[in-house]
Image (tube, helix red, strand yellow):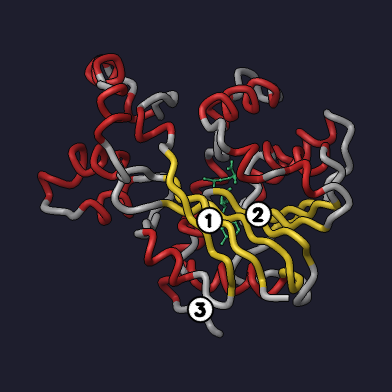
Amino acid sequence: MALSDSSIEQKKEVRQFWDAEPCGSRYLEQRQDFEAHARMRYALEPYIHEFADFKSARGLKVLEIGVGMGADYIEWLKAGALATGVDLSEGSLERARLRCELAGYKADLRVADAENLPFPSNSFDVVYSYGVMHHSPDTARCLREAWRVLKPGGEARIMLYHHPSMTGLLLWLRYGVWRGKSLRQSVYDNLESPGTKTYTREEAVALMQGFRDVRARLVFSPGDLLVHQPSAQFQSAFYRLVWKIYPRWLVKRLAGTWKLFLLVNATKKP
Ligand SMILES: C[S@@+](CC[C@H](N)C(=O)[O-])C[C@H]1O[C@@H](n2cnc3c(N)ncnc32)[C@H](O)[C@@H]1O
């Protein structure tokens, strides 16, 4: 299927965004301090290990779509999986390759687009993608590709951004309310790369066409609880105060399903 001009342009912007600041690079105390990055990542998102279930992949063929700086990708290698990783951003892949090399692992990392995966159908036992597909212009197409390359009986583990969430609400208060934008538009325009989409649980499940045993659960993102390190535009005294007084305990009690991360497991029919 041919991509529209606007979709090509948007994907270029997505790539440029992640080339300029590979995901999580603000946690690198020094350029090569990948240990610090991993420590911070798994402290802030302790559910990743359980969701990815790296250990279960020993000897299996795994595809990680959108590896970023490779924090999870190297966990597949450590677990003994035959792991291939792709990302749109060469800048991110450079870091991921360096991370593997420094740790003594041989990486199979390539630039590729989640919407057009360069692999034959029915190739992988596990397809994993964490926080990636909602950044691509055609998320449904990314999921169709994930399904295609998965072997029958294989499992997909996909994290997508959920609507509504506390992160969305905070972005709306900061950028949307004064301009008459919706919660979703505020996320679309202001959360990470331009054009970030969010899905209700029902919408996400509907996107998993062809999959079976689709299970989806919600968890708080670091942004929902403001426990992450603020990005460059939130460094002023005002934002430092917001971070300090944000009532995390109250949010945890009252936010209900207003959580950003939707963790989706599904299998391809054998
Ligand atoms: C939020 S980062 C997540 C990276 C990594 N999964 C993590 O959790 O640290 C999003 C990543 O998705 C990649 N990405 C966005 N659209 C993509 C696409 N169409 N194909 C492949 N990678 C894509 C970006 O380059 C970026 O590295």
Quarter of the image where the C terminus is located: bottom right
Q: Residues within 10 Å of mark 3 (few under 14, many from 20)?
A: few
> Residue 134: horizontal and vertical position, in percent?
46, 58
The quarter holding residue 5 reads bottom left
Q: Quadrant of residue 10?
A: bottom left
Q: Earlier in the sequence, mark 2 or mark 3?
A: 3
Q: Which residue is mark 2?
A: 128
The three-letter amino acid code for the residue at tag 2 is Tyr
Q: How far apart, in angstroms, are the residues tagged by discs 2 and 3? A: 24 Å
| Residue 15, visible in the rendered structure | no
- Compared across the picture, whether 10 is left or right of 244 comes to right
Give how far apart the Cα atoms at labels 1 and 2 are: 10 Å
186 relative to 230, above or below: below
Residue 253: image location, x then y, percent: 28, 30
Q: Earlier in the sequence, mark 1 or mark 3?
A: 3
Taking the spot 81% from the left edge, 36% from the top edge, the residue there is: 100
Classify mark 2: residues with Cα within 10 Å, few (<14), some (14-19) or many (20+): many
Residue 3 marker: 3
Q: Is residue 163 above or below residue 219?
A: below
Residue 175 percent location from the top left of the image: 21, 42
Residue to which mark 1 is pinned: 264
Residue at horizontal 56%, vertical 31%?
A: 46
The three-letter code of the residue at mark 3 reads Leu
Q: Residues within 10 Å of mark 1 (few under 14, many from 20)?
A: many
Residue type (three-letter) at the residue carrying disc 1: Val
Q: Say if 165 sits above or below 132 in the image.
A: above
